Amino acid sequence: VNMTATSLRTAPNTEPPRLKPVVRLTHISKRFANGTLAVQDFNFAFPQHGFISLLGPSGCGKSTVLRMIAGLSRPSSGTLEWTRDSVVADKPRRELGFVFQEPTLMPWATALRNVMLPLKLAGVPKAEARERAVAALAQVGLAGFENAYPRQLSGGMKMRVSIARAIVERPRVLLMDEPFAALDEFTRFRLNKDLLRLWQENSFTVVFVTHSVFESVFLSQHVLLMAARPGRVMARVPIEAPYPRDEAFRTSTLYNECCREVHQLLGEANAND
């Protein structure tokens, strides 16, 4: 694996080779109304079926980038382009899921009803919506919990419901904003492995925000290292370990070397900021 610091720094904004992008951000900047420049000159082409992590300190614009991809916030400058087969009438198709740091479930609704909600809003017939929601819950390991309320579920199970709700519309892009940050280490590791399984089974593109070097290396094909003040990509780090990844990878020499390299580059990027 070519993991030298020099090679990682040479082209921080290039797209991964040989992979068609699903969405491309070119010279994207975001300045808020109060004058804060949250993101500056962000360039990256997110590949189809890719798993990309945005890694950096708080305030470096990771979540802002997700919100711009989702259409929840407009760039102040630059262009955000979806590939032609992912747009209809020049607008992104409804094939984008978003998982937030908190599960944001409706406390008065069962797990099944929570997962059915986006399908209901999209006008999917009730019988089909129910069938798809049941299947999505089974995919995240919650078969048999369809009638459970959020108060009856653990933190990890509530996050699984949130993921099921995000994938029930069969997205081409899944945006995840530090979804496992509040969970204990054991639950987080289990969800990391389950997320990789879902990604491989469903073939969507994942854009994953995290503060954890270890999590980003375990999950990702590419890690974008971001520096704050203002947020920008300092390097793209390829993680060239094969999938599926399991505990053997987490304890391997390659994993430790990748984590050490990413940690060093991230520290240098922000120390020199």
Image (spheres, grey):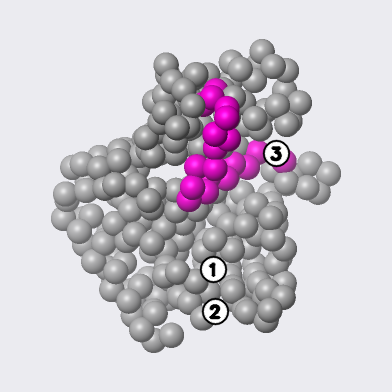
Which residue in the structure is indicated by mark 2? 230
Dominant secondary structure (helix, strand or loop) of the stretch shown in magenta: loop
| Front residue of this view, candidates 263 and 163 | 163
Position of residue 5 measured from the top left corner of the image (x, y, whole percent): 31, 74
Q: Which mark is residue 94?
A: 3
Q: Residue shown at 66%/32% (left/top)?
A: 118
Residue 116 colored magenta?
A: no
Type of residue at label 1?
Gly
Position of residue 219 in the picture relative to residue 122 (left or right) = left
Mark with earlier residue (2, 1): 1
Residue drawn at 28 percent across, 73 percent down = 264
Q: Which residues are magenta?
A: 93-112
First in sequence: mark 3 or mark 2? Answer: 3
Rendered image quadrant of residue 253 = bottom left
Q: Do the numbered discs 2 and 1 sit on residues whose CB atoms are within 8 Å?
A: yes
Relative vertical location of residue 24 with respect to residue 121 in this rendering, above or below: below
